[in-house]
Image: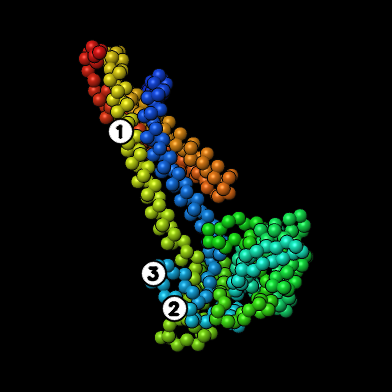
Amino acid sequence: MHKKNEISVVIGQLVESAIAAVYALKSNPVRTFLSTLGITIGIFCIIMVLSIVDSLEKNLQDSVDSLGKDVAIIEKWPWEFGSTYKWWKYINRPNPTLDELKKLEEQVSLAKSMALSINLPSLTIKYSNLSAENVSGMAVSQGFPGVRDFELEDGRFFSENESKNGEQVVLIGSAIAENLFPSLRATDRLVSIKGKKFKVVGLFKKEGESMLNNSMDNVFIIPIKTAANFLRINSNMVNSRIQVKAKEGVTVNLLENELKGVMRSIRKLRPNEEADFAINKTTLLSKPLKSLFSVVSLGGWIIGLFAILVGGFGIANIMFVSVKERTQQIGIQKSLGAKNYFILIEFLVESIILCLVGGTIGLIAVFFITIGVKHYLDLNLFLSSANIITGLFVSVSIGIVSGFIPAYSASQLDPVEAIRAK
């Protein structure tokens, strides 16, 4: 019971201190504004950078996930970075082929689905007197929907017979459809690609911009065998890859190990002979970029902390001024029985509120900027709850650090001397 009374007394004093602090801040609005400006700028810098980094990381991860977290990709080019990239070594490697895809399908036990895809050169697609220029194309095998996540707005994917017979059918992205069919349904219409007529059988749902430039919005895809009309699909000059999706519960590392063995067997490589293929995973893309984002975050913290440091000195200075102005009031409070900790808490709460006001203004500024960027630039920039908590926590911490010495000096004043002070 005694402890409960003590707790209620402390809570009452905290509330009283907060009310007194708010009243003191309201009585000097200009001083309050100027003293919180440094904190506002500091919190704004830190949270703005953290929000940009979080948004970029999320957009990157979404782009990487669209390639497939559980997908291994066999191709001649390894996903490596840096000045030591041995392109001259990889350029003469053979590309994966349809025959190899067929053998992999027969021999690999840990794969759920797999598909061969070939990048086509940028082309112009025409319909009537309208055209979509610089459109990226891909030729894919029948298993493509099993390894690449996408949604169709309308229509369907190629049938097995269409793929097997190399029929002139095509799926197009939303940006292509907007150019060619602004007021018409795209599916079942005939478009012209390199002078040949293709039937549009499907329309990809709009995906939006992608950091890895792998959005389907400005892409058309045709069956692999149909691409033989445009280029030699087994040529070493084309850029082909086999995407392999792991079975449920199978890690991509396990799948990679099996693929290495099977591919070496298919290409008849001796045990001591170096592999003439690469097996890439999406983690190879995200790791170096995450390191870059960490450096950018650190830069934001450093810039913000300099502003907060200046703001913290400003808060401490204002609190010393506030203590001096209210010295007689402190003496009267202490002569009426106010404890030292009550005076300490009163000024500490005032310092914390000052910093919280500054931090909140900084967070509000970030919030409105993210809304503006999302609306006008169509970029997915957001302020996360974690960053809001970080901003408020930093504000409270600076309030405690900046206000403690002035608050402590106020709590140690002699009541008689304080009352006599002018």
Q: Which amino acid, mark 2?
A: Trp
Frontmost residue, 336 versus 270: 270
Looking at the image, tell me whether mark 3 or mark 2 is earlier in sequence order: 3
Mark 3 is surrounded, within 10 Å at the Cα level, by few (under 14), some (14 to 19) or many (20 or more) other residues, namely few
- The quarter holding residue 172 reads bottom right
Residue 313, labelled with which disc? 1
Residue 62 placement, left or right of 43: right
List the residue tagged with mark 3. 83
**Helix, strand or loop status at disc 3:** loop
Q: Which amino acid, mark 3?
A: Ser
CA distance separating discs 3 and 2: 13 Å
Q: Residue at x 66, y 77 (%)?
A: 230
Looking at the image, tell me whether mark 1 or mark 2 is earlier in sequence order: 2
The quadrant of the rendering that contains the N terminus is top left
Q: Residue at x 23, y 20 (%)?
A: 413
Query: Is residue 59 among the parts visible in the rendering?
Result: yes
List the residue tagged with mark 2. 88
Question: Compared to 261, does 182 lie above or below?
Answer: above
Q: Position of residue 369 (x, y in %)?
A: 51, 41
- The quarter holding residue 63 reads bottom right
Residue 19 placement, left or right of 240: left
Q: Position of residue 158 (x, y in %)?
A: 71, 70
Question: Compared to 14, does 236 lie above or below?
Answer: below
**Helix, strand or loop status at disc 2:** helix
